[in-house]
Image (spheres, rainbow, N blue to C red):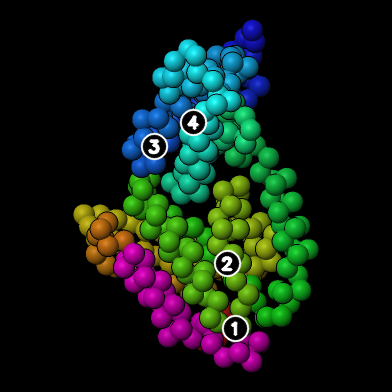
Amino acid sequence: MKDSSIFLDDFKFSREAINQQLDKIFLDPFFMNSDILRKFLSFIVEETLSGHANWLKEYTIGVNVLNKSTDFKPQDNSIVRIHAGRLRRALHNYYNGVGAFDSIQISIPKGRYVPVFTEVGDLAINQLNNIGNTLMDTSAAALTKKAEVIAVLPFQHFHNNVVENSLVEGVGLQLTNALMQFENYSVVAYYTMRDLWKKTLDIAKLASVVDARYIISGNIQNNENKLRSHIQVIDAHSGIQAWSCMYEGDFAPENIFKLQDDIVQFIISELTRSGRLSEEKTKHNTSLAAVA
């Protein structure tokens, strides 16, 4: 049997850190509403941390997690595989939403039941460079068709809960899509920027990787159902703040989609009104910094 302390050293995580990550995951609605998913993930994590990863087979999971009898035959019953698929999807949804910025990622490779613990920042620079090279190789021709490249970073916020995380994700994605109406600019895909941002918080590095001239960033503050958002456009070449605005409105969790629409419409309206964006398709020499 492999000593658990050596096992944990291999993964660079303490048992406490992994258990804290589990606690965060279990606050997500996908897990809060499913005793089976919580029990399934807890069991395979605990067995792995205890050095019993080789025990994680369909039979042991069926008996210990799903309360199947000792004569359970996995070859005749796919229930473990079904719940494993649910668990993989739930983890995927968590890390693409609420857990997007977590430092420890727990995943379960298909065909196996042993969880993998990944340190998000461990290979960040190599991954960043690899992604950047791929982006440059595959999209260079498209990027040269337009004058400038613009990208949206995930907005900062201060309450790590489902509602605010959903709002931030929605605003980022919707704002990115809205910017595509301006023919003078190529727009970097939001999920590309979000994934890169998780690996490095260096705006200049990010801008260099995706060849972006302008970066839109902002924050969202919520206090007693009042919301305030500061938005800015950064000239990545100079580091200068080229433009900014502030949105204020009511925060109503039950009407989150309308709030998302309102914020994005406000930003686009203010950018257009100020002359910072041009909707003309032929003026490729127009830039955010050049227009008064």
Q: Residue furthest top?
A: 1
The image shows residue 115 at horizontal and vertical percentages of 57, 28
- Total number of numbered labels? 4
Secondary structure, magenta segment, majority class:
helix
> For this rendering, which residue is in front, 275 or 193?
193
The image shows residue 153 at horizontal and vertical percentages of 52, 60
Residue 208 is inside the magenta segment: no
Query: Pointer 1 and pointer 4: residues touching (CB < 8 Å)?
Result: no
Disc 3, SS: helix
Mark 3 residue type: Phe
Residue 57: tell me if it is visible: yes
Which residue position holds label 1? Answer: 183
Q: Which mark is residue 151?
A: 2
The mark that comes first in sequence, 2 or 1, is 2
Q: Nearer the viewer, mark 1 or mark 4?
A: 4
Residue at figure coordinates x 76%, y 57% from the top left: 133
Q: Nearer the viewer, mark 4 or mark 3?
A: 4
Residue 218: tell me if it is visible: no
Q: Is residue 263 left or right of residue 209?
A: left
The residues tagged by marks 1 and 4 sit, at their Cα atoms, a distance apart of 51 Å
Disc 1, SS: loop
The image shows residue 20 at horizontal and vertical percentages of 44, 28
Residue at figure coordinates x 52%, y 28% from the top left: 77
Mark 1 residue type: Glu
Q: Which mark is residue 31?
A: 3
The residues tagged by marks 1 and 3 sit, at their Cα atoms, a distance apart of 43 Å
Q: Which residues are magenta?
A: 257-286
Which residue position holds label 4? Answer: 79
Q: Quadrant of the N terminus?
A: top right
